[in-house]
Amino acid sequence: MIRLKSYTLHNYKEIPQFDSISEEIIKDIEVVGHVLPFKTNNYVVDELIDWSNVETDAMFTLNFPRKEMLDKKHYYTIEQLIQQNADKSEIQKRANDIRLTLNPNPAGQEHNVPFLGEIKLKGVQHKYPETVLFFPSQGQTCHAYCTFCFRWPQFSGMSELKFAMKEADLLLKYLSIHKEVTDILFTGGDPMTMSASILESYIRPLFEPRFSHIRSIRIGTKSLAYWPYRFLTDNDSDDIIRLFEDVIKAGKNLSVQAHFNHPVELSTDAVKKAISRIRSTGAQIRTQSPLLKHINDKPELWSQMWRKQVDLGCIPYYMFIARDTGAKRYFEIPLEKCWQIFRRAYRQVSGLCRTVRGPSMSDHAGKIQVLGVQEIKGEKVFVLRFLQGRNPNWVDIPFFAEYDSKATWFNQLKPAFGEDKFFFEESKAKIQVTKPFLFE
């Protein structure tokens, strides 16, 4: 049995392969890792990283901080404190100050937190009527942390930025009231870091008749890519599989929302066996990833991923645009290039792979897809649409933004054709939702 061994800033030098790593790379890990959470494990280290090519290896970059992931002045601040042997509390304070400048909870996530009476459900987000996100407090970590992660505040130790709760009774009461909800997504962090018994304690009550309106249970996880043994040889792997089978027997749809960022994550025998075992329960596996500079910014990588995912019985689901948070400047790609990469990859695959949607931005207003760049009445514009919206009436309505070759996120775009605002804006300021789905 292969057992999980985690590596963090405290012990990563125990990794045997680090004997050949340059002092410069090690220093960068130390400096940036004090600001952006860092953690990896023995499966990633032994099976996924090309240690002969760490300077450009995508999996190394996905797991180990690079100098360029921090602004130069922020890097220098932490570097100086380390060199001066500053007190840990001083380094932590400065790191927290820097974190607050990195847009820690993008896309207006704080506006997605609903109320039950006067109780704010800090571990719930309800942005779209039919879907509730739940952040179980026991699952707010991962087997390894992606350096691009838009939910990095979950692991930063800054509790005021964290979405989490363990009060299942409040979640269940909220769901019993909101009959419009058909889907619940367990997210994090990674719910698959929880024990089978804890995961079951959240899921099994949803089998009760009063939750007949909950048709789909989703689990957002990176475990297939970073620790497939979760479904194979962990002590409670068989219990996880039985739970998945019971979800299907209860008449619910179970969808594992799997994060795969690079083809190498689909290459090992362990991940292939884990995918097969999950699918044997009747669960679906839907795949998604952001489009990331230095990682997967070539159409051929995406077409290869989609084809391999379909070969393994998975359903390509989303290509996202890297969110405007954390190390985004290192990973970001102009919107037009995102669209070009998507369409070039899309045209290389068969219809079975074309279930994928993108490139999409999870903005405050909703999921906005870049449909393309066109010239209309002499003006070059982005053609956009909502895949999801805070207001369902916005969904699938095309709209237009002025072309901007440097834009990497929606908030950098302006309405086209001289319009004062986009059709969904009540004013030039973005819609602010202070108490979504308030229940009195």
Image (cartoon, grey):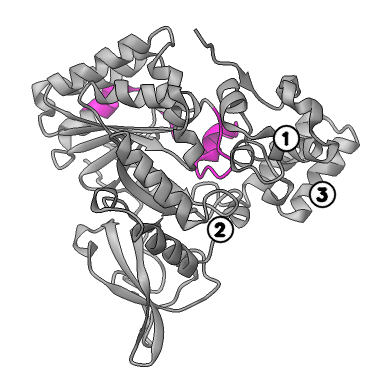
What element does badge 3 sit on?
helix
- Is residue 108 in view? no
277 to 83, vertically: above or below: above
The reply, left or right, for residue 393 in relation to residue 160 is left
Decide: is 124 above or below 4.
below
Q: Is residue 150 left or right of residue 51?
A: left
Give the magenta part as a residue range: 144-172
* Mark in front: 1 vs 2: 2
The residue that label 2 is drawn on is: 332
Mark 3 and mark 1: Cα distance apart in space: 15 Å
Disc 3 crowd, CA 10 A, few/some/many (<14, 14-19, 20+): few
In the rendered image, which residue does mark 3 sit on?
76
User: Cα distance, mark 3 to mark 2?
Assistant: 22 Å
Residue 126, x across and y down, in percent: 30, 43
- Classify residue 201 by image quadrant: top left
Quarter the C terminus occupies:
top left
* Mark 3 / mark 1, whichever is N-terminal: 3
Residue 187 picture quarter: top left
Please name the amino acid that badge 1 sits on: Gln
Q: Secondary structure at mark 2?
A: loop
User: Disc 1 designates what residue?
Assistant: 92
